[in-house]
Every structure is written in C-alpha cells, then in structure tokens.
Amino acid sequence: RTIFSAFDRNSDKVIDADEFKRMVLNHGLNLTDERIEELLEQVAGPSKAIDFPTFVQFMGLTATDADYVLSEKEGLRQKLLETLNTFHTFDVDAGGTIDINELSSILRAMGQRISPGELEAMVNLADESGTGEIDFENF
C-alpha cells in the first residue's frame, strides 16, 4: 500500500495516466508516450486508472480479499490519525474543541490574514451544534 500511495500523488485512490507515466519513467524504462499509454490501457482498461487491486496484480504480487480490506483499513486509520493530529494542532488549549481565537492564532501563524467576519463564518460553517466551537466530529 505504501508503494501504491507513493505513486498516487493526489491521493484519489487510483494511479491516473500522469502518475503512471511518472511511475514508468522513475523505474528507468525509456518508453514513448504512446507506448506508456498503450501499457496503461492494457493494465487498467478504458478507464486508464489503476486502483489498488489492479496495481497489486500488475506488480506481480498476490493478495487475498482480506489483505485488501486490511490495507483499506490501514489507509483509513492513517487518514484518521493525520486528521486527529491536525485537530490537536488547532486545539491549542487541548479543550476538545477549536474556538475562534484558536483558529485565528493558527491561521495567523500560517501567514493567513483572515478578517473576524471570515473567521466567524468559518466556525459557523463547521459548528453544527451552535456552540461557537468546532469539535472533532465536525472538524
């Protein structure tokens, strides 16, 4: 899964034509654009998008359905951990929510200049409960 993710640069869960071309060229294969396109169509069919199971097959690896499920779960777990870490970065006081002051501080530290009205609109957009704060579920 790690190798697949390295080639899936935009994290859309498929290796598209541009990503496939990079993959081929990075492996030192000196193929024309036309040959790369033909190869992609042979591997992925008319969609010209390689999903993880197709990638595993293309690379000559073997995997069971359980491996695919486990791989998907691991990918979701990693995304959840990344999101949780980002949330904790914004939740400066570790109170379990992000208020307008915390949001403002982080955005300013990132070099963003956001007006108070824009900040309020951002919080209101994510604050489904109307508390004036963003919890992890709504983050």
Image (tube, rainbow, N blue to C red):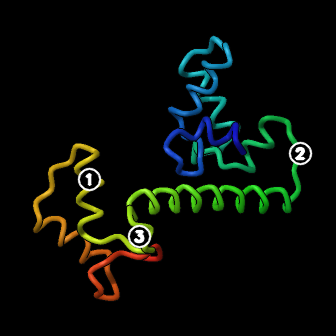
Numbered circle sitting on residue 107:
1
Residue 57 vs residue 19: left or right?
right
Q: CA distance from mark 2 to mark 1?
A: 45 Å
The amino acid beneath tag 1 is Leu
Q: How many marks?
A: 3
> Badges 3 and 1: C-beta atoms under 8 Å apart?
no
x, y (%) of residue 60? 85, 36
In this figure, which residue is indicated by the disc labeled 2? 62
| Residue ID for mark 3 | 139
Disc 2 secondary structure class? loop
Between disc 2 and disc 1, the foreground one is 1
Of the numbered discs 2 and 1, the one sitting upstream in the chain is 2
Q: Residue at x 73, y 46 (%)?
A: 54
Q: Quadrant of residue 95?
A: bottom left
User: In this picture, is 83 found above or below 39?
Assistant: below
Please tell me whether mark 1 sits on a helix, a strand or a loop. helix
